[in-house]
Image (spheres, rainbow, N blue to C red):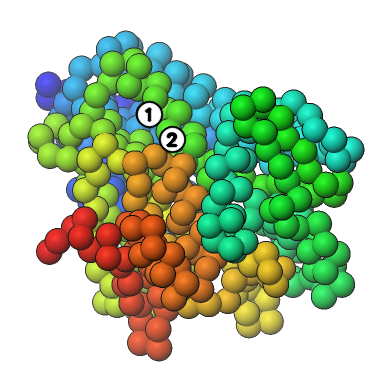
Amino acid sequence: MTRLRLIAICAAASLAGCIASDRATRVGASGSGVPLRSAGTLLAGETLLVGETMGSAWTVKVNGTLPIPAEELRAGIQSRFEAVNQALSTWRADSALSRFNEDDSGEWREVDPELASVMSYALKLAEASDGAYDITVGPLVNLWGFGPDPATHRAPDAQAISRALSRVGWRKVEVDEARHRARKQPGVRVDLSSLGKGRGVDRVAEYLDAAGVSNYLIDLSGKLRARGHNSAGSAWRVAVERPIADAGTDSTAVEPEVVTLHDSSVATAGDYRRFFESDGRHYSHIIDPRTGEPVRHRTVSATSLDHDCMDADAWATVFMVMEPEKALALAAARNLEMLLIERGPRGYRLRPSAAWRAGRPH
Ligand code: ADP
Ligand code: MG
């Protein structure tokens, strides 16, 4: 069990990131085009599989003997990610979501069951967050240059914002999950980027479980899910990273927080990896659907722990959109494990929910 096996399919630069990092995997906010997040040190007896999907790199660490050849397992993982991407991507013109988005008839139509199930889940979070989380932000995401349309890296004018806002509102979408049907008002565009990666990770976990792999750590660009233990016999550990963009100026502000995953998931959403700056202002890819503009509050990142990765991914975005005090109140009301990192006058501040603190007593 001493041989390290490395199935390298992703770019060489990404690969370096896989192996040249600390013991704990780091988790942080990310987005399309961001280099691979580190996967931590590979221990003897562990196999690292890598690939790319949804504009990001993925890694899967497996501990123990593989039930099927590594290349076959890698291909199986890739195809599970791709199936989710083909259902939920707004970047692919032929995805089930893009086809639904283009239908401006206002009538019920049959949709891919995966799409129906994810939209139905996301609409519940829209209601729970009082509309802060809203999957109909598509026109605004595009307008601000964070969607498939070419980016201008400039703030749009007020008229364009109010035109896009008139097409936004989660109540404009209805889903009949049992019958795999959905409808939306003409002009509405659904965006599931806030939870699609998490769903992909869950589908890969299902695949690994069915394939007989019982010790694994899946990482798709800061959305992670783990089961079992590493080859040292310990539960998989990941580190919640502090904001990279400001690391030089605030290097002592916050120590990374290490999280242990026991058959559970963790995801981070943040405003520091996908943004642009114009006229001295910072514009995040997280949009407040009530103003039509990128959020402006003090939250730098929100991390959520949950059993399923889709829940962790979606909730992390919810907490990123909400004002910090409201996010903390909602996490408390729902007993959710959440860690906010806030920008203060003198560096960063960690603001864990009670459930987060209870989950990791120091
Ligand atoms: P990433 O997947 O880039 O790491 P997130 O999971 O936080 O980060 O998802 C961010 C994406 O969610 C944005 O790029 C945008 O497409 C979408 N989004 C932005 N604002 C909202 C919002 N208020 N509600 C739901 N989705 C949003
Ligand atoms: Mg998210």
Q: Does any portion of residue 27 appear in the rendered image?
A: no
- Where does the N terminus fall, quadrant-wise? top left
Amino acid type, callout 1: Ala
248 vs 320: above or below: below
Q: Which residue lies at the image location 47% right of the left edge and 72% below the top edge?
A: 326
Question: Do the CB atoms of the residues marked 1 and 2 lie less than 8 Å apart?
Answer: yes
With 271 as the anchor, is 59 left or right in this view? left
Would you name the residue on which mark 2 appears?
201
Q: Does any portion of residue 133 appear in the rendered image?
A: yes
With 284 as the anchor, is 156 left or right in this view? right
Would you name the residue on which mark 1 appears?
205
Marker count (numbered): 2
Disc ID at residue 299? none
Q: Which residue lies at the image location 78% right of the left edge and 64% below the top edge?
A: 165
Label 1 residue SS:
helix
Per the model, the C-alpha gap separating discs 1 and 2 is 6 Å
38 vs 341: above or below: above
